[in-house]
Image (cartoon, rainbow, N blue to C red):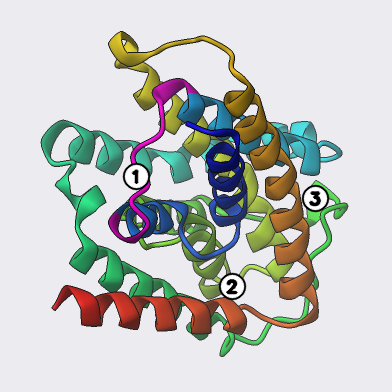
């Protein structure tokens, strides 16, 4: 892998991991049309660590207090993804290379994002909001977690589906945004664990491309969090709904 390829993949991972456009869906897209092969396992681990650090840095002022007061809800919301993820991982991985399924999943993401624009909510996104203002009931946590489980499908955005689910369940934009991304921490850790189960292909040699990919994922991850914060606060998720609709329609046409 060249440094340019590492930079590109790191930026893509950081941006699409948090923007509501599906990182796994874009991976299928790039592998199908740009002839980009699956990156080395250690590189994949490093870029996921980069995005994980981006979340920890972005929410550093409220992460500990939020986790202490909402640990049961986070656990409840994580369970569906664990069940579905293990079921898929142990049975069928072909879905992660299925262009037709990916196109439909992008369209599903578009519908979810569009529907959030029809829900009336007035509370802006503020990452410095006190955790006492963030109220997620166990039922709402399970609802959000179910959407996160669906987002395992390539093309369904994890951030888009969980933020949408939060808004659908009556949470403010602020609460949905915060809960979604703190919930992403165990999700990213889970992806790392699955990657590390196959240590036979793990070459831990720290190369320049690996460092470039890690840094690019970290920086672009922070940028994407700031961008989504701004868009959700000032506008709505319609631009991402349009993007995923156009992309899904294009891929659907090609796959038929």
Res 61 → quadrant: top right
Residue at figure coordinates x 73%, y 35% from the top left = 56
Point out residue 236 in the picture as x, y percentages from the top left corner.
Answer: 67, 81
Left or right position of 4 against 190: right
Nearer the observer: mark 1 or 2; the answer is: 1
Look at the picture and state if 154 lies above or below 208. below
Is 34 a magenta residue? yes
Q: CA distance from mark 1 to mark 2?
A: 20 Å
Look at the picture and state if 205 lies above or below 216. above
The magenta-colored residue range is: 32-42
Total marks shown come to 3
Res 166 → quadrant: bottom right
Residue at figure coordinates x 88%, y 52% from the top left = 128
Secondary structure found at label 1: helix
Left or right position of 74 against 31: right
Secondary structure found at label 2: loop
Residue under pointer 3 = 132
Identify the disc placed on residue 170. 2
Q: Main secondary structure of the magenta part?
A: loop
Q: CA distance from mark 1 to mark 3?
A: 26 Å
Q: Residues within 10 Å of mark 2 (few under 14, many from 20)?
A: some
Using the image as rendered, state which of residue 123 and residue 150 is in the foreground.
Answer: 150
Left or right position of 136 against 88: right
Identify the disc placed on residue 22. none
Using the image as rendered, state which of residue 22 and residue 207 is in the foreground.
Answer: 207
Secondary structure found at label 3: helix
Residue at figure coordinates x 60%, y 34% from the top left = 3
Q: Are marks 1 and 2 in contact (CB under 8 Å)?
A: no
Point out residue 104 in the picture as x, y percentages from the top left corner.
Answer: 27, 73
């Amino acid at each position: 892998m060249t440094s340019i390829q590492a930079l590109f993949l790191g930026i893509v991972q950081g941006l699409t991991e948090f923007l509501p456009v599906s990182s796994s869906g874009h991976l299928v897209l790039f592998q199908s049309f740009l002839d980009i092969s699956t990156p080395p396992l250690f590189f994949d681990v490093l870029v996921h660590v980069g995005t994980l650090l981006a979340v920890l840095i972005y929410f550093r002022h409220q992460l500990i207090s939020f986790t202490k007061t909402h640990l049961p809800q986070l656990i409840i919301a994580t369970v569906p993804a664990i069940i579905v993820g293990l079921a898929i991982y142990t049975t069928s991985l072909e879905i992660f290379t299925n262009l037709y399924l990916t196109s439909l999943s992008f369209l599903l993401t578009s519908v979810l994002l569009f529907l959030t624009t029809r829900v009336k909510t007035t509370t802006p996104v503020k990452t410095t909001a006190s955790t006492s203002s963030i109220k997620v009931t166990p039922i709402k946590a399970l609802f959000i977690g179910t959407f996160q489980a669906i987002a395992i499908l390539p093309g369904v955005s994890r951030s888009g589906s969980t933020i949408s689910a939060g808004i659908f369940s009556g949470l403010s934009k602020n609460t949905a945004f915060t809960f979604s991304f703190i919930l992403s921490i165990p999700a990213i850790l889970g992806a790392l664990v699955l990657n590390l189960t196959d240590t036979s292909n793990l070459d831990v040699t720290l190369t320049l491309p690996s460092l470039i990919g890690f840094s690019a994922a970290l920086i672009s991850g922070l940028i994407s969090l700031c961008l989504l914060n701004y868009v959700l606060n000032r506008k709505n998720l319609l631009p991402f709904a349009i993007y995923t609709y156009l992309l899904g329609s294009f891929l659907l046409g090609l796959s038929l």
